[in-house]
Image (cartoon, helix red, strand yellow):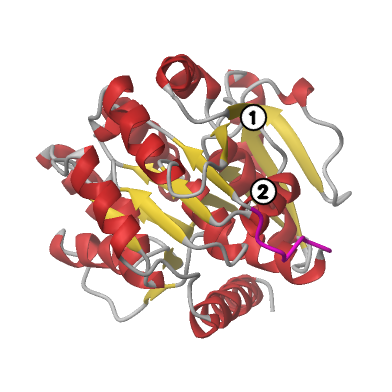
Amino acid sequence: MTRILVLGYYGFGNFGDELILSAVQDELTSIECEAVFAVNKPGQYTSPVCPRHTLIDRHNLAAMRAALRTCDYVMLGGGGLIQDVTSWRSSLYYLGIPLLAALNKKGILSYAQGVGPVRRSWIRRLARTVFGRMSLIDVRDDASRDFLLASGIRTQDICVSSDVGLAYLVALRGTALVATRRTSGIVACVNQRFGWTPEETASFLDCLGSQSSTQLDLVVLFPSADLAFTRAVRDRLLTPSELIVSPQPLALLDLCSSATLTVAGRYHMATAAVAARSPLVALAYDPKVSQLADCCGFDAFLPGNSPQQAARRVRTGSVSPVAEESIARIGQTRTDRIARLKAVLERRNP
């Protein structure tokens, strides 16, 4: 049976990356393969849902060497792993291991991968070298494909699918009993990387809440990065609010599904709102949020908008859920992505 070593930013307490881990595991259950996921602190997890899947400690060099030696493929397993905005070291890690695998005659794969932004020329060259050797290049959006083409990847086989976490939430929402009645509530996830101060962020949310004197749920998806800032925002709010830290995916879908508005200051908060069919606006702290907004058809504010301007646009505009056609398209990308991976693995093991 084909053995795949899966790399990702798993196990560091970020809702989005934990969602991606669950999503990749879920998609691989339908494929005849043994998947080994390299994670931070594997003891924090219960057993994987599929008995063919195992978890190893990404910091354990002996375990990583053994996994690399015994695998048939190394896979970049979703998320925005190849970028140098937060750190160039992450790109070196996620490109270096696949390159080492390729030099040892292992196959390498990209699965629902986000690529860019990359500012350093040497990372661009390394990305061109690694992606040019891949048996499957599947990226999550057009911007990732365009980056690879601009970097010199000359192939017709760059496949654009969707974010694997988004597709997973769409699948969950399709099978779960989720509340559909809109209550008088706003769900918001805030992020200091957008550039507003706590006072400005609170002012924006209060302007939205003053329309209906509504309850505000402040959701923290990445506590180590966002909890202190979110508490500072909450301390300055006039609108009654509740703090919700690290909800499970179904609970987050429930929150978004019943809200009159979701304010998404994290990428995977936006994906939850899309999947839950919630009216949605996003704070585009990162280009990937704008790219998702363009793909799905919701409004995203860019850094530089004042809180008052942004609130006025929401209050005077028409904020609607994402169209069902877009939701259906996302679901189809999941089906197509799994089929492409199956085909690649079958070619190696007919």
Q: Which residue is mark 1?
A: 244
Please say whether residue 324 is one of the residues in the magenta stretch: no
Q: Is residue 66 above or below residue 299?
A: above
State whether residue 302 appears in this view: no
Magenta range: 177-183
Neighbours of disc 2 within 10 Å: few (<14), some (14-19), many (20+): many
Q: Amino acid at mark 1?
A: Ile
Residue 332: name its quadrant.
bottom right
Q: Which residue is mark 2?
A: 255
Q: Name the residue located 54 percent from the left edge and 22 percent from the top edge.
A: 223
Where does residue 179 sit, x and y in percent of width and height?
Answer: 76, 61
Q: Amino acid at mark 2?
A: Leu
Q: Name the residue located 44 percent from the left edge and 46 percent from the top edge.
A: 264
Neighbours of disc 1 within 10 Å: few (<14), some (14-19), many (20+): some
Q: Are marks 1 and 2 in contact (CB under 8 Å)?
A: yes
Q: Secondary structure at mark 2?
A: helix
Q: Is residue 142 above or below residue 242?
A: below
Q: Name the residue located 74 percent from the left edge and 68 percent from the top edge.
A: 31
- In the rendered view, does 8 fall on the left or right side of 85? right
- Could you say which disc has been placed on residue 67 in the image? none
